[in-house]
Every structure is written in C-alpha cells, then in structure tokens.
Image (cartoon, coloured by chain):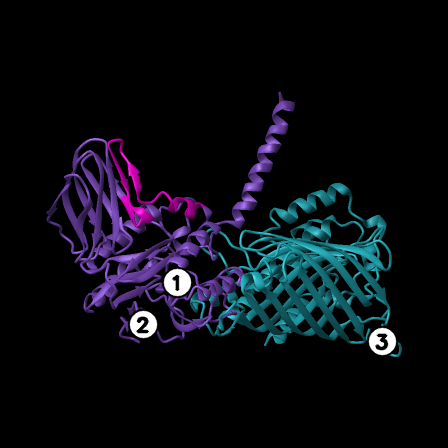
Amino acid sequence: MVRGLSLLVSSALIAASMPALAEPASPKPEEASPTSSERAVAATTSVVPGVILHGTGHYVLGEPDTAKRLLIVEGIGLGMVLVGGGTLALAGASRYLSGPATVVAASGFGLFFGSFLADLYGVTTTDADAARRRSRSVAGAETEIGYQRVAGPTVHETDIVFQRVALRAGDFRVTPSAWFAAHSTGVRYRIEGAYRILGSTPGASGRGTSDYLDVVVGGLHHRAPKQLFSRSSIELQADTRFDFAHLGATLHGLFFELSAGYAAGRIDYEIPGMTVPSDYDPVLLTRFGIGAIFRGRTHVGSEAVIYYDHRHDEIIGGLVSRGLGSGALGRFGVDGRWFFSSNLGVAAFVEIGSAWHLGTSMVFRQDGALLSGVKDGS
Amino acid sequence: MKRVIAPRAREVLFVCGLQLVVACQRPAEERARRDLDVGHADNGVLGVNVPGGLAAVRVFTSDRLVLWSSAPGWELELDAREAVAFTLELRNIMPSADLTVVESAGASIDPLESELVTRKRYSLTVPAGQTKLRLGAPGALEDGAFRFALMSDVQEAIDAVDDLYLRMNEEDGVDFLLGAGDLTEGGSVEELVEFQDHLEILELPYYTTLGNHELWSKHPPYQDYFGRSSFHFVHRGVHFSMIDSGSATIDPLVYEWLDGWLAAAYDDVHVVAMHIPPLDPIGVRNGAFGNRAEGASFVAQLAQSRVDLTLYGHIHSYYSFDNAGIPAFISGGGGALPERFDNMGRHFMLIDIDPRLGLTDTRIVRVDKDY
C-alpha cells in the first residue's frame, strides 16, 4: 500500500511534468536572463499572491509553462490534504483509516509546500545551469561520525555520539548506524537494507536528475535504561526523490523527497526486580522534504533539506503544543551537508519535536562502485 | 537615543524569542503552576485553604463562600482574623457527604436547604483563629469496595449529555462519575458554565481532569470552574491520581507531584486517569503523547509503582487493553464526533474496585439505541 502511494505521488508529479520531460529542460540563453529587478518583482509575487496561487512568480518571470505545472502540483497537494484530512475528520480518526489518511494528508502538504518553495526558488536562483551541470553521482561508501545534543524537559539522554556507515553495491545499499548516550548506557542501533528500483547507483556518470525510488527494510533497537524501557522495531518503507527540474529549467537543483512506511514496534519494560509484559506499538512512517543541491565551491553530495518527519518514536518524538493538535504532528527539521573536497565534508541538522535536537558530524564519502564488476545501474 | 534603545530592544526580542522556544517545550507549565493556587483565597478577614487544592473557590465575599469540589472528601482550613458568619455552599459533592468540625474553638455549622442533591449549604460561624472542617460521606475514610462511572469527551455534544446523566441516575450504588477530559469543544467560560448547568441533572458528583479541548484560549479558564487539572485523592482506601496530559505531555512539575502520589499509594490500590493516553493502542494513529519515549517511560513508571488501573479519554470510542500489564481503558463516548466503524456510540463505563482486590469488574453502558 505504502509503495503504491509513493508511486502514485511520483506518478502525479511526473504527470504534471510530462511536457517538460518531453523536452529536456535547459536554461535560457544568458542574454535572455531576467534582470535583478524583474527577479525581485517575481520573487515578491511568488509570495503574494503566490502563497495562494503557486507558480505566480514564474508566470511573472515569463515562464508560464513552469507556472502551470507548479499550479498543478499545488492542486494535487491540496487535493490530497483535503482527501486525507477529510477522511481523518469524517471518520473520527478511525482505527482502520487513520494510517493511510495521515500518509495522504502529509504527502499532500509536502507537495503543497514544495510547489510554493519551488516557485520562490526558481525565480530567485540565477545559477540553475550550474545546478544542472553538478554531478549527482552516488557514493559507493560513506561514513559519518558526530555529536548530537537534545534539549527538552522530558528527555533523559541529552548528549549523544553518533556513527553511520552506508555501503552501496549496484542497486543495493546497507546502512548500519548507532548512537550512544554520553552520560548513560542508552544506545540506539539501526540497520537499513535498501534496493534501488529507480535512480542512479555508484559508478554511474552522475549526470541527469536526482530521481530515485528505494524500497527500504529496517531494524531498530533503542535501549533507554534511565527511562526503564527498550524499543525494537522492524520497518518497511519506500523512499523517493523527485527532481523539480522535470517541471522547468529554472528548478534545476531543487528536489522533493517522500517516504512512507510502517514499523512494527515493541516496547519492553526494563524495571529492576519486576517482570512486566511488553506492549506492541506500531509506528506510521511518513516523511517529506524539499531540498536544494549546493554548487559553487562545494563538492558532490552537498545539499540541504527542510523536512517534516511524522514518526513519533525518535528521541524527540513529535511536536507538543499547549492544546488542540498537540501530539498529532511529528517533527520539523533542516539537514545540510557541505563537502570541502570530493571525499570530506561536514553535516549538521536541527529539528524540533517535543524537544530540540541538534547535531553535527564529519562525513567521508567515496564515489564510484564499491565492488568491481558490479553492474552499472544508471 | 536610538543607539541606547536598539541594544535593549534586541535584548528584549532575544529574551522573548528564548521564552517562546522554552514555552514550546513546557506547554503545560502554566497550568501546573496555576494548580498550586487552586483552593486558596483570602479576603483580608478570612483565609481559606483546601489542602491538595481539592476544591476550587468559586465565590468568596464577606458573607458567602462557594466551593466546587473535585474529590469525595477533603479538609477546609479557615483562618479568621475575627469572628465571622457566612453562608458556605459546597457544589459537586456526594449526596451523602456532610461537613463536620475537626478542630475549632466554637465553630457552628447549621445546614440550610439546597435544591440539588449534589449541593449543600450551611450557615457557618467561626471564631477568630484556626478552624478545620472536613467534608466526607459516611464511611468514606474506611476501606471498602465501591463503584464509580467513567465518561469523557463530551465536547460539542453538551446539549445531548443529559441522556447519559439520566441513564447514570438509573444505576444503583455509583459513588461518583470520573471524567478524563474534553468536557467542552473550546473550553470557553460560556461552555464551562453550560457544562456545569447540565451537571445539575446528574445525581452524582463529577470529578475530572481537563482535555486538550479545554485549552483553546491563551489563558484557559478551566481551573477557575473545575479546579486543579492534576490532583490526588483517596476514597474508601483507593487512591486516584488525575493527571493533566492535555498537551500530549506531562509537565515536569506534575511529574514531581506524581512521584509523591505513586509513593503514597505503593501498597494500596491506585487508579491513574488522564485525557491523552501515553500510548495509543492503534499506534499508527498516535492519539497519544507526542513522544513515544515519554509515553513508554511514563507507563514504566506506573508499572514500577504497582498502579492497578489506568483510565483515558481523547479517542472517541471504547478500548480495553493493557499497558505494561496494567489494565487500561479508553472511554471517549460522551458524545463528541465518534470514531466510525467501531460499533460503539455514546457510552459510559461502570467500574467496580476494591481496596484489597483492585479492579473487580467493568461494564459498558450504551446510551444510543442504534448500537
């Protein structure tokens, strides 16, 4: 079901971008580039009235086709929000419909938000061609080590050391990761195995779009002795990335991410001197993000994503507010990577849920196929 | 001049921003601190104190004191600077409850007529100095099995809630109705007053905590009308802890109080009730705490303290399950938009509990004929 929904969203985006796909999107010749004042006007209109009519900025900038496609994406997103949200409301958060309805509503909100940001991005970005030329090559190996800080009144593990490794061979990826609490024996292990159905793989040229579709199987174990419990889960989800360049030449370097899935979770209580029955605790996995690829002095792999993640079992859970709606939403965050060379970079993120969560890390990546003889999947 | 003000303005903006960020992290802090003010008042001549905040001071003038009770029994401490005479009105009390003098040098209590079984009025004369009174039903301090009802999530259906109250009145042997929040749709003064007006039909007192729907306004008036959002009382040997989880989290101050309540009830039967459950039995819906880790940790804390029963609202249906082995019930059948396809409808629960045996029986009473 989840994979089907991801495919549905991707199909909708591709349908909206069909004319652009038929003609490879390329930036206008230099002499036809808009002036700064024209861009300023377009940027302003992309906000007002663009916040209502997505694509207004592109229309003002003389890109009516891109404007129309952004408007279509907005419509698709809005429709999904209404269908998903309406289902939740009318069905009284039915146990049978809440999961699928939430995925549809969250995905729709992502498209809605994405088409708004895309309009603003497209009219303010002057180096779309540089973004187009930037390689999208996939690292065969990547490793990351860093520190995370969590700040909130109900959080027990505040200082965390984090490590992750990602190894890719052909269409397959395996990503073990772990974090360790600095002041307790709290620990979280996670392993992901992914199969790339669509998109670039290590060893490919890296030219083209950022599109991909992965099916991901994951396992997680989080032990929190201070909080008297541990959580284990098995997860299945689909991860997709859609390159906004499909919608217009001005949108090179911008992408939309969507993940949806299900985690079968179990909570084991670790109470000294007591044996307590475990609880089954499934989790809905839904995430969307809108990101941009860095260019200029950065190297391949540099990008930033603003995202919403609905899952509530991460260390900071979902947003809490004073009253109505508290606990229903997940967390919001920004994640960025900056590579100084073809191999070495830094990553940082900040997110807010029921607490603040910040992290920074060093990242090492190695392009190209990890194993010789593996078929080039590009 | 601007050079002087600008750094100050930046400082103020920074502090305000910081407060906003911190406030996001403790959304229930203001309510927890307001809980500390419930049950205390002073008009210059007479000081009123209800330990534990188990009654809210609704009206306090020179000749009239009106208290809204949040629990079956509590003490009333009066500190008179001079001898005073006034009318004391107690609302939302058990029909069999009465007021007695515990400590006084000459206080007199004369019952007056009252139009409702859940209200009592007295003509009270207290001498200068300390006077301690106690409200309680006969035998309320002795251990013994009893029955109470549970109903939550009335919200927009206040006009139709009388159906549930009339049906409850037909049940024998129910000591009180326990509420797990969402009395109203928006928590306004008008709605809270309307809710209390409808309660006049019910022949039982209604002891409740608040829900997320009581928290729409910037400064929710709930505590002025129904008292504390987190409190603890003991009835016939059974402990009840009512917890404010209306923000899908529990404030650290309430966690501190809870530690004491859990310790006090460790060897006794203990019922813990709140609006939003720590964990939703339908996990993908997440009608639960915003952070699953907090939910799991909270449930572990209850299990470690040998809590006997957990009661929740928020989800507009009926669920029976366990959390960390503790029997748990969600009963959100007060009339709010129902969960579809659950074949439940409006309902309330009847719960039998014994201070020696714990939970002995539960029963659902459905009100709508369609189900």
Q: How many C-alpha atoms fall within 10 Å of the one at disc 2: few (<14), some, or many (≥20)?
A: few
Mark 2 / mark 1, whichever is N-terminal = 1
Say if the magenta span includes residue B162. Answer: no
Chain under disc 2: B
Chain under disc 3: A
Residue B117: numbered disc: none
Residue A376: numbered disc: 3
Q: Which residues are magenta?
A: B30-57
Q: Which residue is at 66% across, 44% downward?
A: A44
Task: Please report contact status of discs 2 and 1: CB closer than 8 Å, yes or no.
Answer: no
Locate residue B270: give its quadrant. Answer: bottom left
Q: Is residue A313 visible?
A: yes
Q: Which residue is at 43% across, 69% downward?
A: A91
User: Could you tell me which secondary element the residue under label 2 belongs to?
Assistant: loop
User: Could you tell me which secondary element the residue under label 1 belongs to?
Assistant: loop
Kindly report the distance in space between the C-alpha atoms of the residues bearing marks 3 and 1.
Answer: 65 Å
Colour assignment, chain B: purple
Is B160 positioned to the left or the right of A334 in the image? left
Residue that mark 2 sits on: B357
